[in-house]
Amino acid sequence: MQLTAVNIYSFSLSTPANCRAAPRWAGAWLGAAAAAASCGSTEEPCTGGVWCRLCTALSSASPPEMLRGKRVIVTGASSGIGEQMAYHLARMGAHVLLTARTEAKLQKVVDKCLDLGAASARYVSGSMESTAFAEEVVKEAENTWGGLDMLILNHIGHSFFDFFNGDVDHVRKLMETNFLSYVAMTVSALPMLKESEGSIVVVSSVSGKVASPFTAPYSATKFALEGFFSSLRHELIIENVNVSVTLCILGYINTESAVRAVSHVIKEAPAPKEECALEIIRSGALRQRELHYPASTVTPILLLRDFAPEFLDGLIRSNMRVENIKRAPPPQGSGH
Ligand SMILES: NC(=O)C1=CN([C@@H]2O[C@H](COP(=O)(O)OP(=O)(O)OC[C@H]3O[C@@H](n4cnc5c(N)ncnc54)[C@H](OP(=O)(O)O)[C@@H]3O)[C@@H](O)[C@H]2O)C=CC1
Ligand SMILES: C[C@H](CCC(=O)NCC(=O)O)[C@H]1CC[C@H]2[C@@H]3C(=O)C[C@@H]4C[C@H](O)CC[C@]4(C)[C@H]3CC[C@]12C
């Protein structure tokens, strides 16, 4: 029998939610969700970093009304997890500003958001390869809403699931799209988020915590996100700035582009994008430090990373059908 991280270690730990500094608007959500969960916590206000019974109860509460009227930017919203987040936010009655490159897809997502009950829905199309575009999106939110409550950074540029072929330009371009644009949007949005005591939600991956083969450029961009945003979180706390930073560590999710890229190699079944999208929104609104989704896969991987890294490396390779990787030719002039 093939040993997999999923079948040997499929247990989950609930991540303690850090509601140390929940803002006024999250308070309404916390109140509603707490009532639904009837947790009867004796630890209010939560001091953060502890196993607060209120927070633990909330993490299994049903999708509440928390984002009604809130102003949310979602990047990479024309497909996959970003598209699903847009629909959840619309059902919750939020104002959404969506972005990606493909205008026709964005228009369809906006139309569906309006049908689902969004307070308002609009899009800006363009490529996040340019930090100027990243800043333009935030400007659009400022001009339209005069403020912002949540910034969800989710887009990724195209990458390959293959042996690294020496293409340095691809690494640079991916760093610009997957990392630098996240930094640029955050810098532009921070004044508005400070004002609203809002949230930054960064969609990352197990690839940003543990390296696996065939993802070298992608993994580098996700490790960069962890370094930058975890440092920023410290600084915001030191300066008493009430803006939360949630890093979402996702395993394999069943989006079209991911399944197309890896289903011939990765043996495990992907988790559902709809549930994933909801968990991301919930973790951001509850101001959790990190989301691990699906917890049954991600949490054991992170434990093994620290306690048995070589064993984990072997497990990762044995979970792949490496023989199905068809090497792409190296770029011209790469010396390979
Ligand atoms: N699916 C998975 O298995 C996993 C996903 N994740 C993370 O989840 C997030 C979403 O992934 P997923 O939904 O699968 O991705 P998709 O490929 O489905 O969506 C990517 C989105 O980014 C947009 N995009 C692509 N290139 C650019 C660009 N240059 N500028 C602006 N937008 C761009 C795409 O739209 P358009 O082409 O129109 O621009 C699309 O809306 C990513 O951060 C990913 O790393 C993490 C772990 C696992
Ligand atoms: C290669 C995928 C990106 C496909 C792409 O370019 N999409 C955008 C477009 O088409 O424009 C990778 C996206 C998510 C990756 C997966 C992930 O992050 C979770 C796992 C992490 C682990 O380290 C490796 C396997 C993963 C399933 C990983 C595989 C590659 C992606 C699907």
Image: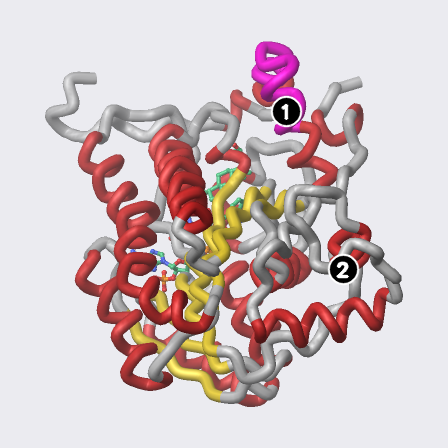
Q: Residues within 10 Å of mark 2 (few under 14, many from 20)?
A: many
Quadrant placement of the N terminus: top right
Give the amino acid type for the residue marked by disc 1 in the picture.
Asn
Query: Does mark 2's beta carbon lie closer than 8 Å to ligand 1?
Result: no
Above or below: residue 35 compared with residue 303 = below
Above or below: residue 281 compared with residue 55 = below
- Between residue 28 and residue 144, name the one nearer to us: 28
Quadrant placement of the C terminus: top left
Q: Is residue 212 left or right of residue 17?
A: left
Give the amino acid type for the residue marked by disc 2 in the picture.
Leu
Where's residue 162, x and y in %?
40, 30
Numbered badge on residue 58? 2
| Residue for point 28% across, 41% down | 175
Q: Over which residues does the magenta segment extend?
A: 301-314
| Residue for point 61% across, 54% down | 20
| Quadrant of the image where one finds ligand 1 | bottom left
Above or below: residue 277 compared with residue 125 = above
| Residue for point 70% across, 54% down | 46
Image quadrant of residue 116?
bottom right
Where's residue 328, x and y in %?
33, 30
Q: Which residue is mark 1?
A: 319
Name the mark nearer the viewer: 1 or 2: 2
* Residue furthest out toward the left: 333
SS majority, magenta:
helix
- Residue 160 on the magenta segment: no
Q: Can the viewer see residue 273 in this picture?
A: no
Q: Residues within 10 Å of mark 1 (few under 14, many from 20)?
A: some
Q: Can the viewer see residue 102 in this picture?
A: yes
- Marks 1 and 2 sit apart, C-alpha to C-alpha, by 34 Å
- Residue 309 on the magenta segment: yes
- Between residue 32 and residue 333, name the one nearer to us: 32
Secondary element under disc 1, as helix, strand or loop, is: loop
